[in-house]
Amino acid sequence: MLVLRRRLKEPLLLHKPHHVTGQHVCDFVEGLEPRRVYEYVVLVTTVQEELLTLAQHYRDRADMENVFDELKNQWGWGGYTTKDLKRCQVMARQIALIYNWWSMFVRLAIPRRHAEAITSRPLLLTAVGTQTRHQGQTTLTLTSAHAQTGQIQQALRTFFADCRATAEPLGWAALWRKMLRRIVVVFLRGSPLRSPPEIPQPTG
């Protein structure tokens, strides 16, 4: 058995009134000082690993569970109204494909962490776009009332301005590689993004 604790950034209410029984429900936190509150996690496992490795395994498993929870509850992957297996498979694959596309698109705006659909959709899908043409130049203006729009606009403006400046000398393949490098920057951990090996074309 493994017991982990983590200090919380903000103090919590330790006793919540229970309106049904009149008793108090205590959270799984401990207040050692007025400004120091901890939460605890108890793990039961037979894996023979060191403490930090087991804690990381638990976090990795929780991250994987969060992905499936997001797919089921925010993307409609939780069930279908037809008993036709083929139609269910087609819809499941379409949802998975769109989920991957959306995750990659969101990573352009928020490259350092995964943003679930429940937060990323209001942030990136509520903008109103206006296209204007002046002196042979086309400008697309996006207007959003979201509170975090300014941060996202600044991040994307800097990135796409750099792409526009290097678009002509780099070419499309290099630009796509640049976008993919930004999308997977967390997973690369400083390593360069290698190009896939060329597939030989069939002859004859």
Image (cartoon, rainbow, N blue to C red):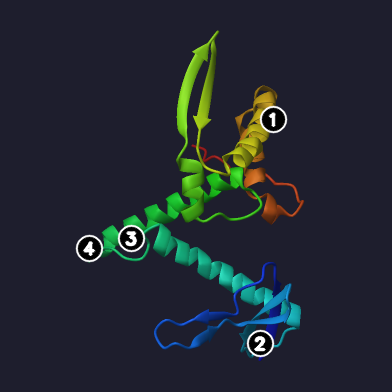
Q: Quadrant of residue 156?
A: top right
Q: Earlier in the sequence, mark 4 or mark 2?
A: 2
Is mark 3 in CB contact (under 8 Å) with mark 1?
no
Q: Nearer the viewer, mark 3 or mark 1?
A: 1
- Who's the residue at 22% across and 66% down the image? 83
Q: SS for tag 2?
A: loop
- Three-letter amino acid code at disc 4? Thr
Question: Where does label 3 land, which residue?
Answer: 89
Q: Which residue is mark 4?
A: 82
Residue at which label 2 appears:
47
Q: Residue at x 73, y 75 (%)?
A: 34
* Distance from Cα at disc 1 to Cα at disc 4: 48 Å
Quarter of the rendering occupied by the N terminus? bottom right
Could you give the CA–CA distance between mark 2 and mark 3, rounded to whole angstroms? Answer: 36 Å
- Residue located beneath label 1 in the image: 162
Indicate the secondary structure of the residue bearing disc 4.
loop
Name above or below for residue 112 compared with residue 176. below
Say whether residue 154 is left or right of residue 95. right
Residue, x 27% and y 58% (percent of image)?
Answer: 87
- In this rendering, would 97 be left or right of 175? left
Placement of 78 over or under 56, stated as above or below:
above
Q: Residues within 10 Å of mark 3 (few under 14, many from 20)?
A: few
Residue contact at pointers 4 and 2, CB within 8 angstroms:
no
